[in-house]
Amino acid sequence: MGDTVTLEPLEKIVFCDFDGTITAQETFVAVLKQFTPDLAAELIPKMYALELTLREGVLQLLESMPSSVYGEILDFAAAQPLRPGLSEFLDFLQAQAVPFVVITGGLKAMVEAAIPTLLPKIQAVHGAEIDTQGAYFKVHSPALGDSELVSKVDIMQRYPAEQTIVIGDSVTDLKMALVGDVVFARDRLAQYLGDRNVSYHPWNDFADVQKTLAQLWQKNRTDCA
Ligand SMILES: [Mg+2]
């Protein structure tokens, strides 16, 4: 078994959401509410209630936006406060050669605008890409799912690893959390997982995540010694 596998699986990898996870607030939802308020008021509650798929809802909302607001959206993303401890957490992961991959259900460009100085410490950013050539946004997904605009699980599968760590906060992280080995959940994601009796580590900032992982990995080393 495994002799024919050419890509050596990673030992560990961290998959991290962006909105409300790296940012302190739900940036993408705020963008949708600000730039397409009427449709957002109608569709967002349906998505939270799991009555409307993220794929349909987010696509409709994005494609209702004029291309002229793209720059404003990136400026908005760049001004968002971040959840504390990310830079230190990335250093901690780098010291142990554990890659950190950002997967957003929103726009890849918003991630890049929000954390430009941290990008060199990040393995990759995956998210929807916007074509602004026409009058309105045209959306390209890196991994279109049946029900999601960006299938985070499909992207996870591109990085085979022995232990996957998932960090998230909301409905777009649910499927990823269900397949992850170690899950950090806050806010709505914690509630969704609790409802399904799935265990998770609660967290509030990246120092919490780092502390828990340091303990967990230390314990594993001791167990294996
Ligand atoms: Mg989120």
Image (cartoon, rainbow, N blue to C red):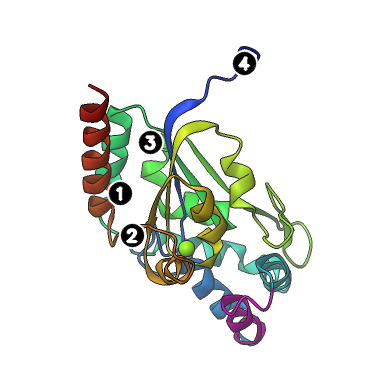
Where disc 4 sits, the SS reads loop
The crowding category of the residue bearing disc 2, from other C-alpha atoms within 10 Å (few below 14, some 14 to 19, many at least 20), is some
Give the structural element (helix, strand or loop) at label 3. helix
Disc nearest the viewer among 4 and 1: 4
- Residue type at the position of mark 3: Lys
Task: State the residue position of label 4.
Answer: 6
Which quadrant holds the C terminus? top left
Classify 126 as above or below 67: above
The magenta-colored residue range is 39-52
Residue located beneath label 2 in the image: 82
Badge 3 is on which residue?
121
For the point 33% across and 60% down, which residue is it?
Answer: 82
Q: Is residue 157 left or right of residue 93?
A: right
- Confirm or reject: label 2 Cβ below 8 Å from ligand 1: no
Residue 184 placed where, x, y %?
37, 55
Kind of residue at badge 4: Thr
Residue nearest the observer in this picture, 1 or 41? 1
Contact, mark 2 vs mark 3 (Cβ under 8 Å) = no
Q: Earlier in the sequence, mark 3 or mark 1?
A: 1
Instruction: Find the distance from the CA under tag 2 to the CA under tag 3.
Output: 16 Å
Q: Which residue is mark 1?
A: 86
* Dot placed on the residue nearer the N-terminal end, 2 or 4: 4
Taking 211 as reference, is 186 left or right? Answer: right
Quadrant in the picture for residue 73: bottom right
Q: What amino acid type is highlighted by mark number 1?
A: Leu
Answer whether residue 45 is magenta in the image.
Answer: yes
**Marks 2 and 1 in Cβ contact (< 8 Å):** yes
Q: Report the residue at 48% width, 69% height from top.
A: 192
**Farthest top residue?**
3
Question: Disc 2 marks which amino acid?
Answer: Leu
The majority secondary structure of the magenta stretch comes to: helix
